[in-house]
Image (cartoon, helix red, strand yellow):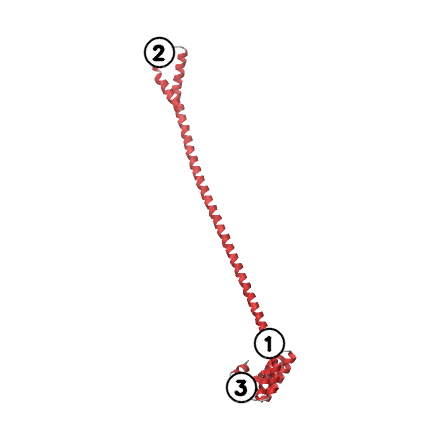
Amino acid sequence: VQSHIQLEENNIEQALESNKKYDSLLRKLKNPRDRILTYNLYTRLYFHTTEYNKARKYADSTIYHALQLKDSVELLNGYESLSKIANHNAAYEEAAKYSTLALPIKEALDKKSREDNLKLLRTKLELEYELLERELEDGKKLIRQRRITAVSLLLLAILIGLLLFGRRILKKRKARNNVLQNLNQTKNKLFSIIGHDLKAPIHTLQEVLSIYDGKDLSNKEIANMAATLKLISIIVLLL
C-alpha cells in the first residue's frame, strides 16, 4: 500500500525501496497472488524510471503467474504494460500484438463488470423492494393496530356508557322504590287513622240499626242521627 501511495505521489525511489522490502517478505511467505501484485508494481515503477528492460522482465513475470492463477485482471495489466513498453521502444508491431491479446480480456472483464454491476443493481433493487415490502407490511400492521385500538376504545366507551346508564336507571328505580315505599307507609298510616276514626261512627250506626229494628226510635231521633249518617257516608265515599 505504501509503495502504491508513493508511486501515485511520483516518489519513485521511495516506492522502489518500499517495494523491495515488501518483496523480501513475500519471498518468505511464498504467496504467488501477492507476488503478482509486487511484479505489477515493479513493472510500473521501472516504467516510470525508463528502465524498460526491467519493466518488461516483471511484466513477463506478471503474465506468467497470472496465467497460472487464471487472474484475468493481472493478465490484462501485464499485456497492457508490455504494449506500453513496446510503444516507448518504437516496437509498434509488438505493441499492437500485445494490445490484440489484451483486447478480448478487457472486453470479457468489461462484460463481467457490466454483469456484476447488473447483479449488484438487481440485488440492490431486490433489497429496496424487500425493504419497501417490509415498510408496507409495517404500515399495514400499524393501520391494523390503530383500527384495533380505535375499536377497543369505542367498545370501552360503549361499555362505560352502558354502566353509567345502568347506574342512572338503578338510581331512578331506587328513588321510585323509596317514593312507593313512602306512599305505602303513608297509605297504611291513613288507613290506620281512618279505621280508628270509623270505629265510633260504625258502632253508632250499628246501634241505630239495632234500635230501628226493634222499632225503639222515633222520627225525631232518626232526624237527630242524620248528621252522623251523612258523616259516615262522606267517609265511605272517600274510601
Which residue is label 2 attached to? 219
Location of the C terminus by quadrant is top left
- Which of label 2 and label 1 is nearer to you? 1
Which residue shows up at 47% across the image and 46% down it?
A: 158
Upstream in sequence: badge 3 or badge 1: 3
Q: What number is the disc on residue 12? A: 3
Q: CA distance from mark 3 to mark 2?
A: 165 Å
Image coordinates of residue 128 in percent, x first then y, are 54, 65
- Which of label 3 and label 2 is nearer to you? 3
Image coordinates of residue 159 in percent, x first then y, are 48, 46
Which amino acid is tagged 2?
Asn
How would you rate the neighbour count of disc 2 (Cα within 10 Å): few for under 14, some for 14-19, many for 20 or more? few
Which amino acid is tagged 3?
Ile
Which residue is label 1 attached to? 109
Q: CA distance from mark 3 to mark 1?
A: 30 Å
37 or 194, nearer to the observer? 37
Numbered label tally: 3
Residue 83 shows up from this direction: yes
Image coordinates of residue 112 in percent, x first then y, are 60, 74
- Which of label 3 and label 1 is nearer to you? 1
